[in-house]
Amino acid sequence: MAENTMLNVGPNFDMDLFVKRLTEAFGAKGFSVNPVKLGESYSVTFEKGVGGINTVLGMGVGIKANISRNGDALMITYTDAEWTSKIIGIAIGWVFGWSVIFLIPLVTAIIGAINQMNLPKNIGNEATMIAASF
């Protein structure tokens, strides 16, 4: 399920400053953000609460945003979404649901799945606000 965000940008658009502001905005929200410059484009990884116990609980969210510019269009393509922990949490809750303690991963994985589904939209909204400032 690849999602995309396309924004119109003007001639004064600065890709480096845009990525810096996007990184700072999500860093302030508790995300670990890792931008990698690839020529004139960027690959930015957003992660929050991944690994450790969150693998079982499914609460972590993560995605990679590939950002490139083609003339007056800024394209953001989302890939490598973090769905594995949600699958694990739902599977544990489903298989062992007869015990109340194992319902916790089921509930948290469902909440994590909702947050994961909203992550591209949240990044797109923040990117739109940042791009409008140029």
Image (cartoon, rainbow, N blue to C red):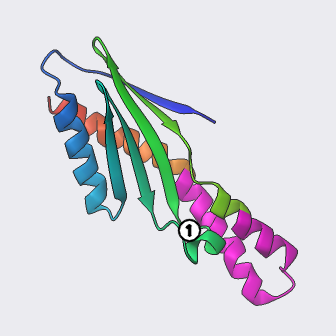
| In-image side of 53 versus 6 (left or right) | right
Q: In this figure, which residue is indicated by the disc labeled 1?
A: 59
Residue at the (28%, 58%) spot, across then down: 27
What is the number of callouts on the image? 1
In the image, the segment drawn in magenta is 88-116
Question: Residue pushed farthest front?
Answer: 39
Q: Is residue 108 visible?
A: no
Kind of residue sitting beneath label 1: Met
**Could you say whether the residue bearing mark 1 is in a helix, strand or loop?**
loop
As rendered, which of 77 and 126 lies closer to the eye?
77
| In-image side of 64 versus 111 (left or right) | left
Q: Is residue 59 visible?
A: yes
Residue at the (27%, 45%) spot, across then down: 22
| In-image side of 15 versus 122 (left or right) | left
Residue 121 location (% of width, % of height): 45, 42
**Is 101 located above or below residue 27 in the figure?**
below
As for residue 101 lying within the magenta part, the answer is yes
As for residue 99 lying within the magenta part, the answer is yes
Location of the C terminus (image quadrant): top left
Quarter of the image for residue 2 reads top right
